[in-house]
Image (cartoon, helix red, strand yellow):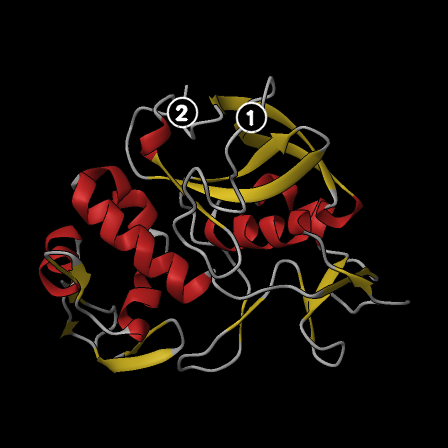
Amino acid sequence: MPILSNPGGATIYIDGKEIGIAPVSFRVEGFAWFVATCLKPGRVSCDKETMFGFLKTKDVARWWWDFTDEQRKTLAVWIIDNYAADRIRYIRSGKPDCKGGEGEWQEALCLHNTMHRYVRLGDPAHLTNYLDYCYWSQDKQVEYCFLESPLTIPPYGIFKGCYGLPVHPAAVRGKHWGHSIVALQIKRDIKNFNSWRFFQYDDFQIKPGNWQMPCGVAAYDTMVKVERITAIDECGCGYYHTVIAKWRIDTKCKVV
C-alpha cells in the first residue's frame, strides 16, 4: 500500500513509529498472510509477539468465523494457554478510571477469575463503567485495574484493551454448590456443548468429570449454563445476565 503526502516529503508515522519519508509503501498483513504465517496443522507457528499484534487489534476476533473448526481449536488452546492461564488471588475496589485501589485486599473467588478472563479475551466494552474501579493482584504488592493486563512480551508494560473473542462466563451448578468458569465458542452452533471450550485457572479444556465440572449425583444433575453479561455487581462477584446455552450432566457424565 503506497502512502503519499501533499506536499511531498513528509515523515510518515504509524502508531508512533516512523516508517519513512513519503512516498513510502508497506504491506497490509491480512487473513491469508496470518493463516500462512501463524497456523500450521495442529499448532500456532508464529511467535508470541506477532500473535499478540493480531489479538490486540481484534483481527483474530474479526476473522474468527473465517477460520476452519480445527484452526479455531488450535487458536483457542494457544490463546488460553498464553493469556488466560494465570490466576487472580486478591481483589479490592478503589478509585474510578483505574487510578488505584484502596482498602483491604480480599481473597479472589472463581467469579473474579472468570471476570478477569472474560474482560481480557472477550468484548466487555459495555461493562467498562462497572470495572474501572476494581483491582486485582497476585501478591498484594503489584496491582492492576480489571481493565489492565500485564504483558510478558515486548514492549513490556500494560495492555489496556481486550481481544474481542466470543468468550462468556459459564456457571456450573450442583446440589448445594456452584462454580464459575469461562467458555470460548469454537463452533457456530451455540446450543451444542462441543461448540465450546471451557477453561479456568491452569486448565484450558474442562470436560464433564473434571473437578470443575463434576458428574451429577443421584436425583440431581449438574447444570452448565453459558451466560451473556448485561451488568456487573461488586467487582465481578455477581452479575446480571441472559442464558445463551445450557445443558445437564447426568450421573454417568453424559451431557443431556
User: Is residue 24 placed above or below 237 in the rendered structure?
Assistant: below
x, y percentage for residue 156?
Answer: 47, 82
> In the depicted view, which residue is nearer to us: 176 or 91?
176
- The quadrant of the picture occupied by the N terminus is bottom left
Quadrant of the rendered image containing residue 105: bottom right
Label 1 – label 2 distance at C-alpha: 10 Å
Quadrant of the rendered image containing residue 254: top left
Q: Which amino acid does label 2 sit on?
A: Val
Q: Residue furthest right?
A: 103
**For residue 164, side relative to residue 239 (left or right):** left
- Mark seen at residue 255: 2
Q: Mark 1 points at which residue?
A: 223
User: Is residue 72 placed above or below 216 in the rendered structure?
Assistant: below
Q: Which residue is drawn at 35% across and 66% down?
A: 52
- Mark 1 vs 2, N-terminal side: 1
Within 10 Å of disc 2 (Cα), the crowding (few <14, some 14-19, many 20+) is some
Q: Which residue lies furthest to the front in this view?
A: 218
Q: Tell me if residue 195 can be seen.
A: yes
> In the depicted view, which residue is nearer to us: 59 or 182?
182
x, y percentage for residue 225?
Answer: 53, 28
Q: Which amino acid does label 1 sit on?
A: Met
x, y percentage for residue 86?
Answer: 53, 66
What is the secondary structure assignment of the residue under circle 1?
strand
- Mark seen at residue 34: none
> In the depicted view, which residue is nearer to us: 152 or 127?
152
User: Is residue 125 placed above or below 252 in the rendered structure?
Assistant: below
What is the secondary structure assignment of the residue under circle 2?
loop
Q: Which residue is drawn at 30% across and 44% down?
A: 62
Q: Which residue is drawn at 10% across and 53% down?
A: 32
User: Is residue 169 placed above or below 249 in the rendered structure?
Assistant: below
- The quadrant of the picture occupied by the C terminus is top left
